[in-house]
Amino acid sequence: MTYDIKKILSLIALTAISLSAMATDYSDTLAVTVNGQTIYKNATITLSEKESGTYTLTLKNLIAGTDALGTITFDDCYAKQTDRGMIFDENITTTIADGDNIRGITWTGPSLGDINFSLRASLADNKLQAVIVFTTTGASPKTYSLRFGDGIHLYNGSFETFKDSKGKEVDETTATIEPEYWHSFNTASGSWASLAGSHCYMSDDTRQNSTSKKSLRLLATSIFGVVANGTATNGRLNAGSMSATDVANHAQIDISNSAKDPSGHPFYTLLNVQPDSIALWAKFKQGTANAQHPYATVTATITDGTYYQDPEDKVYTNKVAVAKNNTIATNGAAWQRLSIPFDYATYASNNAEQKAILITMSTNADPGQGSNKDELYVDDMELIYNADITSVKLSGENIEAAAYAGENPLPGYASLKIAQVEVKDVVAASDFTVETNARQPFVYKEVVDADDIILNDPTLPKNADQIATIVCYAADLSKANAWMVFINKERMAGDVNSDGKTDISDVTAMIDIILGKDSTKPYTYDHKAADMDGNGTIDISDVTSLIDVILGKQN
């Protein structure tokens, strides 16, 4: 078997993992991004096991934006078992087939010819997620990025889609628009909602090098001399008091609440996994400088989905984690990237399970403070899932590794480190302890006999007895970091029969190896100890060297 570096990271299966003999349909949300623009739709991926132990993944009737592509089938995919479930990681060249016979649709995918697809998928807790990326060729090439699976990422975090009070998509800002899946005072509940005014706008002010064409602009206003902060949330705002500091004015979330916004979306965002941080780009400008209240704010709270509000009106024990930055400074009114880690430790005693996330952003960290005309621009908000391997231990001992500097290019989402260790005994995957900087990564460990694989990179260590592959995937499959550990067994050169000394019996054993009398695994003798000159071949020169060692002519 040949192992190149890409296949190491693709987790080529040495042992197939059985799912079932039946095909299983998984229906979920599919986010389709075409040249930077994202739309959401329902889709079904069918996962089926073949008699060979490999799997087939099929995505039927793909329509990406205005492009009716067809059905994509990924055949002969290998599954590997991680600590959290199965992982598929493949680079596959195939064609897109016609979809079903649907009136008014002409499938264009088959005319595109062979396409190289990057596929990463996972199956954990009976939930399938997948990331599929491909680029078409020809006069008008397009890059398509497909993300299958709800409860992992934010909807419309790039704030590219805005809708009016009737749920109709708009391209010009008005007093009644909101970003799709996000909510302002325009859709607020509470007795004072109609007096809150408009604070939410579409903007074409975007950060440098952004693929976005739009951003969210929040504007503070003055109502009866009281500053009303510009605020938006993925939950629902409630305007319950004329007093800006009253907690009756808040953002709220409750996944049991069936209320829908004008676009038909609920006032909450589901979350099935635990992100490590939330990142966004922000630009803050004060209408009038206010040294006592100089900051804007963003808060993200992960909950168990039961009722929660921000600001809080009591102590809530349904919180899983909180990420908060209430010191967003003007920074010269320049765009700045903010990365806010989630604090899980403080809320661990709640023993709550993540089911939803409430995000609130406002022109001032203090309710009713700041000034009229304060502006907060927000763009490219996303949940971040880590995948760094911070340490690897073998039987409790730390292993040092260096970045791979070989000849093979790595996939853009991956990194690789190389390590070498010397051991006394055969190593199993369970002997490795892996630590990461991620809350819920997929960690894969495998140890194979080095003689069973061929590495096509001359820069990698030679003559190992075993090779361990350790891969950490982010929970959203966005990135992967791998280690290859080359394991050498401690041995005495020439001790072919492994009795702790070199004598004429080792010469006899070496000759048996040369004559092919010990060619079937498991070997009777230590073939690496017989390779006296380390050239990978056991021949008469090794016999001569061993005799010289026995006679004291060679150390």
Image (cartoon, grey):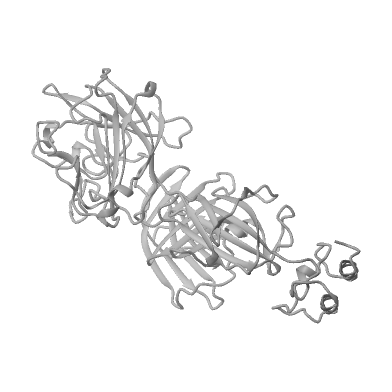
Q: Where residue 219 sits in the image (x, y, percent)?
A: 25, 28
| Residue under the point 45% across and 76% down | 20
Closer to us: 533 or 41: 533
For residue 105, what is the image quadrant?
Answer: bottom left
Q: Considering only vertical position in the picture, is 328 above or below 82?
A: above
Asked whether the viewer can see residue 108, the reply is no
- Residue 283 figure quarter: top left
Q: How many marks?
A: 0
The percent position of residue 41, horizontal first and vertical second, equals 36, 54
Rendered position, 88 above or below 265:
below
Instruction: Please determine whether, in this image, residue 12 is positioned above or below residue 38.
Output: below
- Outermost residue toward the top in this view: 288
Task: Answer yes or no: is residue 217 visible.
Answer: yes
Q: Quadrant of the N terminus?
A: bottom right
Identify the image quadrant of the C terminus: bottom right
**Residue 28 drawn at (x, y percent):** 36, 60
Q: Nearer the viewer, residue 79 or 206?
A: 79
Q: Residue at x 15, y 45 (%)?
A: 314
Nearer the observer, 535 or 180: 535
Tell me where residue 113 appears, x and y as whole percent: 59, 57
The answer to whether residue 541 is left or right of residue 12 is right
Residue at the bottom extreme, as displayed: 517
Judged left or right of residue 127, residue 218 is: left
Give residue 475's quadrant in the image: bottom left
